Image (cartoon, rainbow, N blue to C red):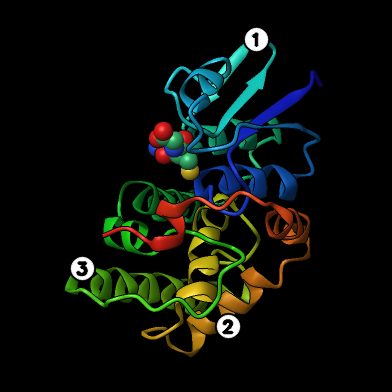
Amino acid sequence: MDTLTLVIGNRNYSSWSLRPWALLTHLGLAFDEVLVPLDTPTFPHDVRRYSPSGRVPALLHCGLVVYESLAILEYASELAGGRGWPSDRALRAEARATATEMHGGFAALRGTCPMNIRARGRAVERSAGLAADIARIDAIWSTCRARHASRGPWLFGEYCAADAMYLPVAFRCQTYGTDGLGAASLDYLATALGDPLIAPWVRAAEAETWRLPVEEAGRT
Ligand SMILES: N[C@@H](CCC(=O)N[C@@H](CS)C(=O)NCC(=O)O)C(=O)O
């Protein structure tokens, strides 16, 4: 297969980059990485060399540029013969709905709890919006685990794109706490954070020296 290149942002902060990286890795697809540091004066120029949206991630393959994380997950799954989603059509529809809900929603969680893989013990004000987002995460994770545990430890049993979509939420729990998550969600959280395939990303994130004030302070 021709070389795949994933264009990513800082591993510590770029939750959207992490998602396709996680799925490509789980699918066993070999790929190169290009990292464009976020929030630098040259980022807008540098990123447009690769991504027409001016954002990361983007996947480069055979002259094609696939941008938008969810589109990359779909493309990666196609390259892997559909293995990025459950093989059962009904489960696949549910997994896609779950992944899409993450992609388009959870504004309060994403805004007030930026992913910061290195950070621990960050306090965050629990707005009504944030509490509602956490309650919805808990409902998704616990319902999926209750229904699919017999097939494996992931949201839909075997690892799929929905797990990649929710991985940054797991890192946010590690940083901002797990209040509001029940036992089944905490089990899933342990699975996600303990995933050995993700360890190289975590090590690289921890080794990064960039400190982005807006991400460190949190956003409101
Ligand atoms: N909807 C996009 C979001 C991508 C996104 O917002 N990426 C951030 C980094 S995590 C970015 O490129 N930010 C730089 C900017 O907006 O200038 C996707 O799913 O890929």
Residue 190 image position (x, y, % from top left) = 63, 78
- The relative height of residue 98 versus residue 42 in the rendered view (above or below) is below
Residue lying at 32% horizontally and 46% vertically, measured from the top left: 104
Q: Quadrant where the C terminus lies?
A: bottom left
Dot 2, crowdedness within 10 Å: few (<14), some or many (≥20)? some
What residue is shown with label 2? 187
- Whole-angstrom CA distance, mark 1 to mark 3, is 41 Å
Q: Quadrant where the N terminus lies?
A: top right
- The relative height of residue 39 versus residue 153 in the rendered view (above or below) is above
Residue 65 image position (x, y, % from top left) = 57, 18
Q: Nearer the viewer, residue 81 or 77?
A: 77
Label 2 or label 3, whichever comes before in sequence order: 3
At mark 1, the secondary structure is loop
Q: Amino acid at mark 2?
A: Asp
In this rendering, which labeled residue sits more in front, label 2 or label 3?
A: 3
Residue 53, quarter of the rendered image: top left
Q: Amino acid at mark 1?
A: Gly
Q: Is residue 71 left or right of residue 179?
A: right
- Whole-angstrom CA distance, mark 2 to mark 1, is 41 Å
Disc sitting over residue 129 in the figure: 3
Dot 3, crowdedness within 10 Å: few (<14), some or many (≥20)? some
- Whole-angstrom CA distance, mark 2 to mark 3, is 24 Å
At mark 2, the secondary structure is helix
Q: Is residue 210 left or right of residue 145?
A: right
Disc sitting over residue 11 in the figure: none
In this rendering, which labeled residue sits more in front, label 1 or label 3?
A: 3
Residue 201 image position (x, y, % from top left) = 72, 54
User: In this view, which residue lies farthest toward the top?
Assistant: 63
Residue lying at 71% horizontally and 36% vertically, measured from the top left: 80
Label 2 or label 1, whichever comes before in sequence order: 1
Residue lying at 39% horizontally and 79% vertically, measured from the top left: 123
What residue is shown with label 1? 63
